[in-house]
Amino acid sequence: MAVPIRWLPSAGAWSASKSCVPLFAGSSRTLRPKCHGPQQPNRSTVARFASTTRPITVKKIAGACGAEVSDVDLAKDLADPSIVKEIRNALLDHSVIFFRGQGHLTQADFLAFSKHFGKPVQYPFVSGLPEYPEIIQVLKREHETSNFGGVWHADTTYLDRPPMGTILLARELPPYGGDTCFANQYLAYETLSEGLKKTLSPLRAISSSAKADVSKTREDRIKEDAGSMKQTDFEVSHPVVRTHPETGRKILYVNTAHTLRFDGWTEEESKPLLDYLFTHQVKLEFTCRFRWEPGSVAFWDNRCVQHNPVNDYHGYKRLMHRITLEGDVPK
């Protein structure tokens, strides 16, 4: 029997409207109700989900996207299917979710956690850990000035089936800096003019792994890795506006790091409109920013958010472990 979510009181608590329907713990979800307007439903900033063991708490960290999930041990508590379901529901609601205090996770624990939400896939350019090839190191060393993935992007959109999600675990952090920013691409699409939406609707764009905006640190890791696919480039055409397969909402699906041009257009013809979209889609009001602590975990929906790690900790090491989950063909 489904147990209703109990919303903790806070300022601006959300009440049901015709356009947005409250969700219930334990309910099945194949397509979530659409919410009209540029923002997701303004529920309470803190929600508590009932499970068969103990409740988990979800607290928004910004208006556009992002929430912290607490009262859960990712190594132990996911044996309860209701907790797995509510974590996934929180991901769909907030597009990126964060867990603190998970430094006790072993590599096996981290991989097991990821498998509750999809099939881990290997990164095409850098080899994973020897015993866990699905886990790669996202590393900036003390002497390096560029960081891995240091530009706004969604992960590996140059693949036919880009990842549905990415999970990042903080292993070693600098004493300051190294935050990660996230940008909501539902809002990026929904705030476009109706005229521009119509213009973009039929368009497709070419995504490439060889675009110059890719970070130098990724190239450094490729050079160091004897098993990497150094000579392989990927290029694919995806819709400029895709529909999220679970929420049904539309997403602006281009990004600075990998989108090369519109399909059928030259790069020169594409540049003015793409430059506008690249600037628009990462406006501050679409973003949240997460400050890492050792043992923090971030889990983002790679279909509807972009991310950008802040490179402001020169002279210090930052080591993260990353898993990406298999996605679908964008439509």
Image (cartoon, rainbow, N blue to C red):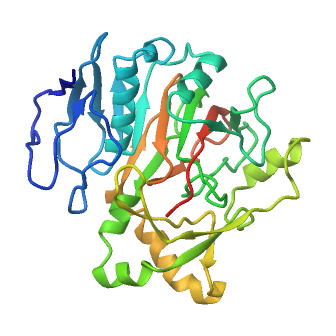
Q: How many marks?
A: 0
Q: Is residue 278 above or below residue 216?
A: below
- Identity of the residue drawn at 35% across and 31% down: 68
Left or right: residue 87 compared with residue 207: left
Q: Is residue 278 above or below residue 309?
A: below
Left or right: residue 180 compared with residue 112: left
Q: Is residue 248 above or below residue 268?
A: above
- Identity of the residue drawn at 20% across and 61% down: 36
- Identity of the residue drawn at 60% across and 44% down: 326
Q: Residue 310 or 159: which is nearer the viewer?
A: 159
Residue 51 x, y percent position in the rendering: 28, 17
Q: Residue 24 or 130: which is nearer the viewer?
A: 24
Residue 324 x, y percent position in the rendering: 61, 40
Residue 292 x, y percent position in the rendering: 48, 32
Left or right: residue 84 compared with residue 16: right
Return the residue found at the far right. Answer: 226
Q: Residue 269 or 170: which is nearer the viewer?
A: 269
State which quadrant residue 89 falls in.
Answer: top left
